[in-house]
Image (cartoon, rainbow, N blue to C red):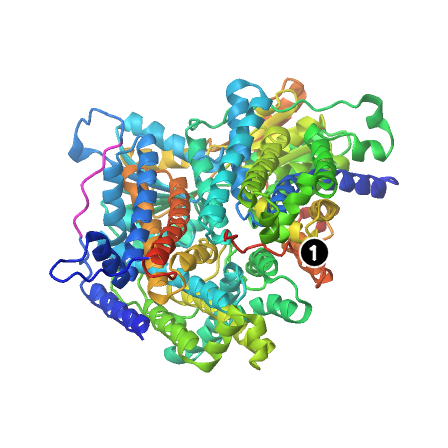
Amino acid sequence: MKKLSALLLLVLIAGILVACAPKATPTPEPPVAETTAEPVAEPEEQLRVAVIFNTTIKDGGYAQAGYESLMAMKDKYNLDVSYQESVGDANVKDVLRSYAADGYDLVYAHELYFTDAVNEVAAEFPDVKFGVTGYKADFPNVVALDATNWQGVYLDGVVAGLMTKNNKIAMVTVSQSPTAFRMVNAMYMGAKLYNPDVEIIHLFTGSFDDVVKAKEMATAAIKDGADIVYGNCGMGTTGVIEAAKENNTLAIGSVVDRSPLAPELVLTSNILDSGRYLTLAVEGMINGDLEWGKAYILGVKEGVEFLAPFNEIVSQDIIDKVEQATQDLVDGKVELPANDNYLWLK
Amino acid sequence: MENSLAVIVVTWLAMSIRMSIPLLFPSLGGLLAQKAGIYNFGLEGMMLCGAYFGYYGSYRTGNPWIGLLMGMAAGGLLGFILAFTSIKLRVSQLVIGLGISIFALGLTGFLFRGIGISTTSPAATLFQKIDFGLLKEIPVLGEILFTHDWMVYAGFALVILIAWFFYRTTSGLNFRAVGENPQVADTVGINVELYRFLAVIVSGVLASLGGAFLSLTQTAYFTENLTAGRGWIAISAIILGKFNPWGVLLACLLFGAADAFQMQIQVMSLGIPYQFLLMIPYILAMLAMVGVVGKVRSPAAMGKPYVKH
Amino acid sequence: MSELSVTIGKSPPLKEKAFLFARKNMGLISVLISILAIFLALSIGAVLIALAGINPWEATSYLIKGSFGNRYGFGETLTRFVPLLFSSLSFAVAHKSGFFNVGAEGQLLLGAVGALLVGAYIQGLHPVLHITLSILAGVLFGAMWVGIAGLLKIFLQSNELINTMMLNYIGVLFVEFLIHGPLKPADSYLYVSSTILPSAKLPILLSKTPLHAGFLISLVVTAGVFYLIYRTPIGYQMRTVGANLKAASYAGISIAKVTIAALFVTGGLAGMGGAIELLGTQFKIINGFSAGYGYDGIGVAVMGRYNPVGIVLSALLFSVIRVGMGAAQRGAGVPFPLLNVIQGLIIVFVIASGYLTNKLSETVIGGRA
């Protein structure tokens, strides 16, 4: 019975602890200085920015770009920054609340799936500004920034459609999400502009970080006849480029300029400057030119999406056609690609 | 394309071989340890260390062999820790292995940060691919057999080596005795503890080779959690393989084939939800275990710490 | 062996005094040794933190403040504790019954699915009823999931360690499939499941924190589980089967029946953990629903030496560290991978220290602690 009575004692203690829990403290914690010694000009006016990442900041892409952007702005505007990484969707509300309660001026959540959580917590802290790389802003202290995620891929499609000889383009993504569908359809649309016979193979790794799997998928597609491979699968993108390298196949990268991985084979990459969201949010806050309570969808026009410098084998004719397509996007002349199924199945 | 099916099958077979290797090395390692009577549940962690230190050594020195050696040393070190805690301290092997794996996951992630956070991590130098020249051009077989990295062939050679060692040498017999019946082995003068230590350390080295294979031949980079659970699948491959090297080889090929198969299905775009395709290797493991009913004779003394009387 | 020297007028020599003390207080000593082990692990973690250029004292102060020094963190820690406790109970029960259930990760996910089906789709129920039924559904689904491995074990002697492990992977994929389609609300943009109805939500215990009634339920269930194991006939049978299969069957115990009972409990506990996590914290199933609770539960159960107090304390420790490390990153910039490093070190050192405890116990008492 000793063990049980010990347990009951524990329950009692737990109950007492819960009852005596520290009261909610509205006063913010003193600001934390970063470890590097910096002359702090005006501590009272120093803007405090907190960012939450869903994955590791060393993912070579999305989060890393956000992190670097944050650090760049920290230096430029003398910010007091803090960040937390690898925050799961299940925990993000806790982190948001902690940052908000800690007196940060801007709490930014850099992940699409955080959108609902951000909106929920924003309602609880009306005096704190929240930003999210997401799709909705229900409250006046929230701003949502997102990319189209497809405009850059549309431009890739123009290049791919004109460069392919087998008319088979492979795309490796993480999943079959609506975003992925939109991307695939965008590639298809772009390619079909100048190449009516083009076919797209869509593969998914099911994982954000399995580089080897992504490489295998790309290899399988190449063996199946694809002569251009496109990778947009988190860390796996490097695997796709490697598969292209091993099989001497042309490739198109994404998120960042992938040309260094295989300079002769990478035609271009659709760069998603995911650091740009943070920049826009912070600068918008500082300069007052961002409309809060609004959800922005940013693309080629706003400089969030664009293509990396072209491989020299891409002809001037193709470059011109990409220019034209870019202008079409800016002018709003391109139809929004479907995100529920493949265009060629409709 | 008339040859489409043939191409798919050939690609699939080549891929199966390639994808079985990251499982083969840790499986053989785990097999070695189990033959001597210790379950190595830390294979995943040892693989990760092999992958990270292999990458690190290769990128710092430009020489993948240095990387390989560093990876092996790291794996061996973890193996030593596992050996010491399991043999001398007689802890739960399942949990110490789990603890080591969690530790290694964190450590490699942490050390990888130290390489500086920049958008493109430095690339390691990969091992040169072997060029078999004309052999590669042989239809069907050329693609399947002669397009691999040296470590693939080393893996197969290792299977033969281990089989020969266990079943044809005295030391091998001693190893098996240590696992089957440590009391008897002790009586005839075999140093049970020493054999077990060696077995576990070597198992760590072998597991690390599996990780190094990933970072030094398959991709020139390390990413956090590069191994993505392969060390755990290796454990089921060992049991599936009925604790002998040929069985383990077949089991790993089976897993590799299943993984490659689901990729091919994706290429063929048959419209099956991809999650089900990804399940195939695991379901296969379970089904194959059923077929292994009652016939699995694990080394009898496994899991029981040996106490010298 | 030490004999008490009875020398009239002289106090016993120091050695005997120490032995007597140790004999009487073995429990306390073993706890102290574990604490020492934890301290060692944390120290190594501190060294690594220092190597990353961060002041370890600062990091520690954020860790403590963030995990129980402020109200929200305190609530967060106890909330994080709940699913961990359930999965470690699951592993412990299985272990006591003689088999390995490493499938808590999958079972808790399936449990969440069960709870979701009742919690999100059945309307018009009184909260108490709604919550109870949802939890029961979770228990059933968790038991069903482990049951697959269990049946394979009972009828085909198939190794349950591997099968439960494989079912983890299969379970995660299966639930992912569910939230991509069948369980996803039609108008949803993202791959998440429907949300449970308000009548199925567990009430909050501590205002302005995430701490919900599941915390109390978990402690009560813990007591109940150990009552079951140590004070009921079926519990006795489970332990007998776990200790010695042959003796159990000679004693006339129906192995199959006992195994089924044990399976139900072990799977049901994990399923309950998932259900309560859904009803109290997450309210819908998403990718990454479980932050590795299933696997951490194994470490916690062993560290806690399979007894209720030990398990509760170990689970608490792990939660403190998990929540605290988040705060340490926010406040001092401690990189996330160090969480795994510290967790791994704690597991390794604590269970390695078990050896020391046992050795000490053998010397002092002549038996294991």
- Residue C27 visible somewhere in the drawing: yes
| Residue B238 in the image: above or below residue C55 | below
Residue A250 image point, x, y percent? 68, 27
**Rendered view: B88 above or below B136:** below
Q: In this view of the protein, which residue sits in the foreground, B11 or B41?
A: B41
The 10 Å Cα crowd at callout 1, few under 14, some 14 to 19, many 20 or more, is some
Q: Position of residue B81 (x, y in %)?
A: 47, 41
Residue A139, horizontal then vertical, whole percent: 33, 52
Residues shaded magenta: A26-34
Camera-side residue: C167 or C331? C167
A237 horizontally vs C73: left or right: right
Residue A136 % position (x, y): 42, 50
Q: Quadrant of the N terminus of chain A?
A: bottom left
Q: Residue at x 32, y 54 (%)?
A: C317
Q: Is residue C309 left or right of residue A345?
A: left
Establish if C59 lies above or below C255: above
Magenta includes C313?
Answer: no
Q: Main secondary structure of the magenta part?
A: loop
Please tell me whether residue A30 belongs to the stretch shown in magenta: yes
Q: Is residue A6 left or right of residue A264?
A: left
**Disc 1 marks which residue?**
B284
> Please, which chain is the residue tagged with disc 1 on?
B
**Residue at position x 68%, y 57% from top?**
B297
